[in-house]
Image (cartoon, grey):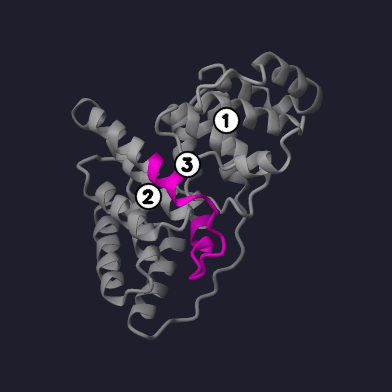
Amino acid sequence: MKNVYLLLLILLLSPMKSWSLTVAESEISTWESKALEELKKHKDKDPEKEFLLYMIAGRELSAYGQEERARRYYLMAYDHPSKSDKTEAVIQLVALNRENKKELNKAIERAHKWFTKNPEQNRPELRRWLEMMEGYAQGKTPYLEQGYYTFWAVDTRIDELMKEGKADEAYQILGPVDLNSADINQRVRQDLLAAVALGKKISPPLSCLPTLEKYPTSTTWSMRVCRFLDDWKNEKKPRETIQSIKEQLTRENPERLHWIRLLERL
């Protein structure tokens, strides 16, 4: 269950960048600078927080098409002395180095080293995918039947963790997500988890914001949550109240009322 989301990651690893979210380069650079400043605070006091921020930086920069910078952060996460699971980092480093055969071979070797030391993380789907990438690196890509996978377990577990108030764990399990294909509720969920797990200064740019800018007067509960998060991140007087969002969720989507408890922690 811990790494189920990596199955989704495999399906998202295409050579095309069309799924990358559109965002201003300056906005990403500003966020990265803030994240680096925060990293300095945690380097000695909370090394696990430092490791998590390296992983999140790699994940977010990759999602926004900043592949070179994403590779750098994922490599920093892999080299970090943390004993946490680094499967996402090694898999992403293989995927992000696909077009550079020399670096790809290094990434594959790195992945094998990780899985040799951590065999419990080496699931059959990952083994098949790495075998395919090894063949590709040699110019002999094997045809592998990938099959079809469902990922309801990921959403279910994330929902369970949110109900338990474990935003950090839920955000880590969420993993890399193709937000261009995600609906607005999935985007808002990711933004909410990032806000609670990482805080105002280093949570990534809101993925729900482009939709809010397109429909600025929308009164759907998802847009109201997005509006609240936008004001919170920019330290503005909130245009929405948690109580009014709670009342709307009670009427329209009571199964998500536990989101309110996370909003209240901001």
Of labels 3 and 1, the one closer to you:
1
Q: Is residue 230 left or right of residue 243?
A: left
Three-letter residue code for mark 1: Asp
Q: Quadrant of residue 249?
A: top right
Three-letter residue code for mark 2: Gly
Three-letter residue code for mark 3: Ile
Residue designated by label 2:
58
- Indicate whether 13 appears above or below 85: below
Residue designated by label 1:
230
Tell which of 68 and 82 is nearer to you.
Answer: 68
Residue at the spot x=29%, y=54% of the render?
72
Magenta region, residue range: 8-31
Residue designated by label 3:
173
* Local secondary structure at mark 2: helix
Residue at the spot x=56%, y=16% of the render?
264
Which residue reaches farthest front? 26
**Which mark is drawn over residue 209?**
none
Residue at the spot x=51%, y=65% of the render?
17
Tell which of 187 and 205 is nearer to you.
Answer: 205
Question: Residue 107 magenta-drawn?
Answer: no
Which residue reaches farthest bottom? 140
**3D distance between C-alphas at marks 3 and 1:** 24 Å
Of labels 3 and 2, the one closer to you:
2
In primary-sequence order, the first of circles 1 and 2 is 2
In primary-sequence order, the first of circles 3 and 2 is 2
